[in-house]
Image: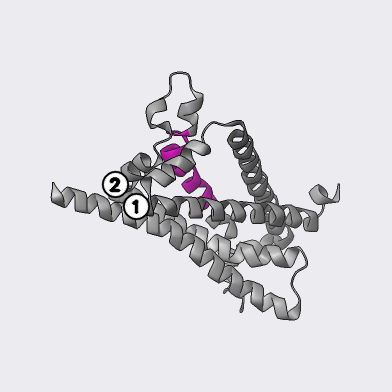
């Protein structure tokens, strides 16, 4: 099958899965921002997206997208290194007009995956998984605001999340317009437009996540000062 065996096919899979993950990040960012303004509203969303069949199906689908995206990233990276041969180890300057993110997409992707693991530990493990486990902490499973407060009251977690979000920003800004280019939406006019859109869109998404982390960290400092 050409999607699996050809370089273009692999790039198409990377692009389609990447766009799907960007859409999920958009939904997740909008959902998280609700926590800043309404704890009740955010917890209501968490309860709705708890261990229901549609949430479980969506989670399984999301996991499959991440695995596919990461595996094909490894394949393309190894393929590119093989194509370069010994020149891959030569000391060269960064080519003109080649973005830093473009040359470091795999490293950025690894940081993103590691950050995702931490995020799953801090939230998915304490929420959806606890609902699924017979002996899980069901009382706190849908109290999303509680877990946000617990996580972002720790300055170490705040710094780690900000580093993760910075890597995610670089990964998104390049990945977004690169996916559009791979899928053929890259005319002379739209090539530059997609680049601008990717920077604006990615910045908005990441700032939404940053706002949640900093807002709840600020609240924890105020609560400590009041005590």
Q: Residue at x 45, y 59 (%)?
A: 208
Residue 177 location, quadrant: bottom right
Q: How many marks?
A: 2
The image shows residue 153 at horizontal and vertical percentages of 28, 47
> How far across and down, in percent of the image, does residue 73 sit?
66, 52
Above or below — where is 133 with respect to 169?
Answer: above
Label 2 to label 1: alpha-carbon separation: 6 Å
Packing grade of label 2 (10 A; few <14, some 14-19, many >=20) is few
| Residue assigned mark 1 | 158
The spot of residue 164 in percent (x, y) is 45, 54
Q: Is residue 121 magenta?
A: yes
In the image, 47 versus 136, the foreground residue is 47
Instruction: Single out the residue that lies furthest toward the left.
Output: 227
Which segment did they paint magenta? 109-127
In the picture, the disc for residue 90 is none
Residue positioned 50% across, 66% down in the render: 203
Task: Please tell me whether the stretch drawn in magenta is mainly helix, strand or loop.
Answer: helix
Q: Secondary structure at mark 2?
A: loop
Residue 63's place in the image compared with 133, above or below, is below
Q: Quadrant of residue 191?
A: bottom right
Residues at circles 2 and 1 in contact by the CB criterion of under 8 Å: yes
Q: Which residue is mark 2?
A: 154
Say whether residue 166 is left or right of residue 72: left
Q: Foreground residue, 37 or 109?
A: 37
Looking at the image, the residue that sits furthest to the top is: 134
Q: In the picture shown, does residue 151 fall above or below 180? A: above
> Residue 63's image quarter?
top right
Pick the residue in front: 167 or 92.
167
10 Å crowding of disc 1: few (<14), some (14-19), many (20+):
some
Compared across the picture, whether 13 is left or right of 48 comes to right
Give the color scheme: rainbow, by chain, secondary structure or one colour: one colour
């Amino acid at each position: 099958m050409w999607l699996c065996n050809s370089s273009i096919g692999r790039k198409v899979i990377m692009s389609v899965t990447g766009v799907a993950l960007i859409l999920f990040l958009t939904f997740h960012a909008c959902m998280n921002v609700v926590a800043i303004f309404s704890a009740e509203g955010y917890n209501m969303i968490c309860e709705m997206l708890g261990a229901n069949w549609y949430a479980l199906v969506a989670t399984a689908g999301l996991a499959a997208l991440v695995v596919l995206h990461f595996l094909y990233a490894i394949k393309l990276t190894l393929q590119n290194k093989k194509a370069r041969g010994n020149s891959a180890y030569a000391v060269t300057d960064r080519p003109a007009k080649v973005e830093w993110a473009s040359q470091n997409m795999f490293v950025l992707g690894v940081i993103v995956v590691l950050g995702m693991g931490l995020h799953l530990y801090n939230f998915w493990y304490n929420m959806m998984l606890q609902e699924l486990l017979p002996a899980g902490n069901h009382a706190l499973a849908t109290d999303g605001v509680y877990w946000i407060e617990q996580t972002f009251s720790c300055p170490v977690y705040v710094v780690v999340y900000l580093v993760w979000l910075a890597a995610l920003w670089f990964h998104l800004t390049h990945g977004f317009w690169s996916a559009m280019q791979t899928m053929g939406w890259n005319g002379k006019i739209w090539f530059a437009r997609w680049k601008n859109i990717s920077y604006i869109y990615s910045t908005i998404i990441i700032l939404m996540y940053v706002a949640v982390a900093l807002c709840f960290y600020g609240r924890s400092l105020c609560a400590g000062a009041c005590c």
